Amino acid sequence: MTVDPPATTRKAATRTRRRARRRVTIVGVFGELLITAGALVFLFLGWQLWLNDIIVGNQDNHTAASLADSWDSGNISLNHEEPVAPDYGDPVVPAKPSTDQTFAVIYVPRFGKDWVREIAEGIGVADVLNTGRIGHYPTTQLPGQVGNFALAAHRLTHGAPFRDIDQLRIGDKLYVKTKDGYFTYIFRNLEYVSPQGVGVLDPVPQQSDVDGTTQVLTIMSCNPKWSTAERIIAYAVFDSWQPISVGPPAAIASLANAKG
Amino acid sequence: MYGTLWHILPGPAWVRVIILLALLALVLFCLVEWVFPWVNSIIPTQEVTVDG
């Protein structure tokens, strides 16, 4: 009798507290909205930097590989590993591509054993770069032309084709395949410029008043990796050309000829 | 907000957990499929090109 009343009071008090905690308050809802917003931001970052990056990258790897396969002619001989590379004459310059058109693919073994990406005309962010492709500066030359074949692509997000651009070593080969043949370039050096450093696009890079006689491949992305403060430029010089009919260079034969 | 959601759901606790997980999966799917690509298209992307 003497114990009961306080017990029921306590029980009632607990009930009241529980009901009070359950009541929806403006501050409570606001807090939960803030937590939700924070979670959404983290989810978006995870999607942009990781999930979507992987998806877009893999997609373009597949698209580029099958596009490259479609350019192969029926009879390809793989027996061309002669000590001296035969001379196949002047390279066939691709026809001037229209904006957004994929006209070549590029293989860079340093970026991964089965790494291959599409090269499209134009450097539009939404129509070319964000699709995981590599963009070609329309004002620069094409493979096989004397001058500068200049390309740009993401280093982070959207498939990040040039994620490992800073990992290139002198002598690394870069192979560009068009529907007519294979262009082999040899990596020469890196350069770091400001976002206004358009000298890298000159036919002879950084020599605006020189016509030049050589073929250069210039690839670029942003630098440092998480920033847009600078651009990282990688130069490669033309080494050799071979028509599509003789098959891919030995180093990328297994890759370029997977379905051939 | 979330407390209210928990209380208006029917059934025992494990049923509510399953319903909430299904709702979460639906929300995540909508985010990845439509919301994130849209956000991505309106925020400024990384600049990778040179421009005079």
Image (spheres, grey):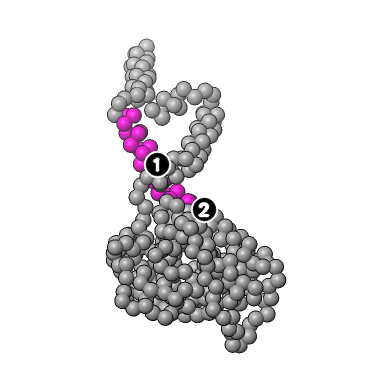
Q: Are marks 1 and 2 in contact (CB under 8 Å)?
A: no
Question: Looking at the rendered structure, which numbered label has been put on residue A40?
Answer: 1
Determine whether A94 is above or below A44 in the image. Answer: below
Which amino acid, by three-letter code, is at mark 1? Leu
Label 1, label 2: how far apart the Cα atoms are = 20 Å
Q: Which residue is mark 2?
A: A55
* Number of numbered discs on residues: 2
User: x, y (%) of residue A17?
Assistant: 34, 22
Q: Magenta region, mostly helix, strand or loop?
A: helix
Part of the protein shown in magenta: A28-56
Left-right relation of A69 to B4? right
From the top left corner, tell me how far across and down residue A39 is, in percent: 39, 42
From the viewer's perspective, is residue A249 above or below residue A37?
A: below
The residue that appears at 46% across and 56% down in the rendered structure is A99
Residue B22 appears in the picture as rendered: yes
In terms of secondary structure, where does tag 1 sit? helix
Q: Chain of mark 2?
A: A
Q: On residue A176, which mark appears? A: none
